[in-house]
Amino acid sequence: MFLDTLVYYLSYHYIFHEHSSFIGKLEIHPYISAFMMSFSVSFPAGFLLMKYVVFTESNLKGRIQLFRYAILVCSCILLNYIFLKFFVEWCGLFPTPSKIITAALVAIFSYVSQRNFTFKVKREEEEIA
């Protein structure tokens, strides 16, 4: 979460200079561009940390864990987008505090989902079936 927030802050202020980007006529707000940048760093780092540091007791195969992690991350991307839009555009908060609040909410959802889905420990009865 710290790495994600740091990359987000640096991207928002120093890479995108708090200005929107355009792809043709499509406008991408700087807080969304910074989110995409921070995600490209946090996805691989997050998977490795979860697999080798947090959920080391999981006995699921690595490719299954990665697939499930990708599914969960897609859900988290959607939640990030919705929460950022909500806090920045509807609540009028600044982008960096909005990102911190969003990251905390998504981290809670992510941890519970990863413990019970992505990196769960299969019981012996499940392995036989």
Image (tube, helix red, strand yellow):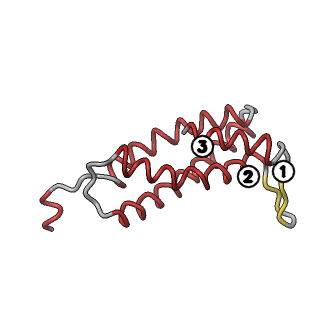
Mark nearer the N terminus (3 vs 2)? 3
Q: Residue at x 52, y 37 (%)?
A: 105
125 displayed left or right of 18: left
Exactly how many numbered labels are in the figure? Answer: 3
Out of 124 and 57, give the one closest to the viewer. 57
Mark nearer the N terminus (2 vs 1)? 1
Mark nearer the N terminus (1 vs 3)? 3
Which image quadrant is residue 123 in?
Answer: bottom left
Percent position of residue 46, x then y? 49, 49
Percent position of residue 5, x then y? 62, 39
Of badges 1 and 3, the one in the foreground is 3
Q: Amino acid at mark 2?
A: Ser
Q: Amino acid at mark 1?
A: Ser
Contact, CB < 8 Å: mark 2 with mark 1? Answer: yes
Determine which of the numbered discs, if any, sits on residue 92 in the image.
none
Q: Residue at x 57, y 39 (%)?
A: 103
Q: Amino acid at mark 3?
A: Asp
Which image quadrant is residue 129 in?
Answer: bottom left
- Between the C-alphas of marks 2 and 1, the distance is 8 Å
Residue under pointer 1: 20
Instruction: Kindly state the secondary structure of the residue where label 3 is placed.
Output: helix
Out of 89 and 74, give the one closest to the viewer. 74
Residue under pointer 2: 33
Instruction: Kindly state the secondary structure of the residue where label 2 is placed.
Output: helix
